[in-house]
Image (spheres, grey):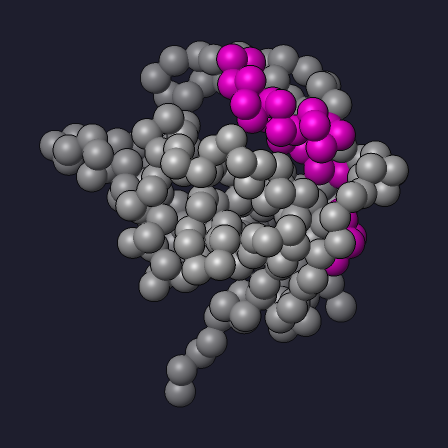
Amino acid sequence: MTMRWPFDDLMLSASGITLRPVRDVDLAGFVAIFPTDFDLDPAYPPLPGVPPATDRERRLVQSIWRHRGCWSVDDWAVDFGVWRDDEPLGIQTLEGTDFPQKRTVDSASWIAKTFRGNGFGIQARELMLAFAFEQLGAEQAITSALVTNEASLGVSRHLGYRDTAVEPHDTGGEVVALQHLAMDRPDWVAQRRTTSTVSGFDPCRPFFGLG
């Protein structure tokens, strides 16, 4: 018997792009466009003796595998591949910790350098937010970026996030300043602009603690 991962059929679509969870068959395409300026999660430290470029690829793939393998209702992360037709553009990650109680989602994302400046980052985040607020019933979305990362902060502010605090963050190699931002459900309802289509969600509902 072969067990099917229900997220394989989940798809979010709007404005000419599609978000669907990254599958193993997709990994090579995303590794090929993975940008060198994306800050990797310090939970996956470099392996001594592995060439830096190879190790970055390993850390990307391992984080996606770990998100699937360690999934629980109380602590989850889904890595949505961002696609235009059949072309991969980047990854939009949606996370929830203590989600049934807090109803708060966090996010991280990257778009390949080749495709930046075309609004794909904004479209992908907006599509993710629609899913979080309208399908998952989130009450708040939070995010953060380096205070020097004007591109990421610009996307968040454009979509209606508000600045909340600047705090130090230890990356494991240095301490950096992170700008935190938040958006509440009323903020989203007031500025909702995109009509999205969601398919394949019902089999995924129990994984989010939804009836």
User: Is the C terminus in the top left, top right, bottom left or bottom right quadrant?
Assistant: bottom right
**Image spot of residue 22 (x, y percent):** 44, 57
Nearer to us in this view, 193 or 27: 193
Instruction: Identify the magenta region.
Output: 133-161
Q: In front here: 121 or 174?
A: 121
Looking at the picture, how far across and down is residue 145, in whole percent? 55, 23
Residue 140 is drawn in which quadrant?
Answer: top right
* Furthest residue toward bottom: 1
Residue 84 showing in the rendered view: yes
| Residue at image location 49% in from the left, 53% down from the top | 83
189 w.r.t. 157: above or below: below
In the rendered image, the vertical position of residue 13 relative to residue 58, given as above or below: below
| Quadrant containing the N terminus in the rendered view | bottom left
Residue 149 among those drawn in magenta:
yes
Residue 195, percent across and down? 75, 54
Q: Please report the residue visible at 87 percent of the width from the left and 38 percent of the height from the top.
A: 190
Indicate the quadrant where residue 158 lies. top right
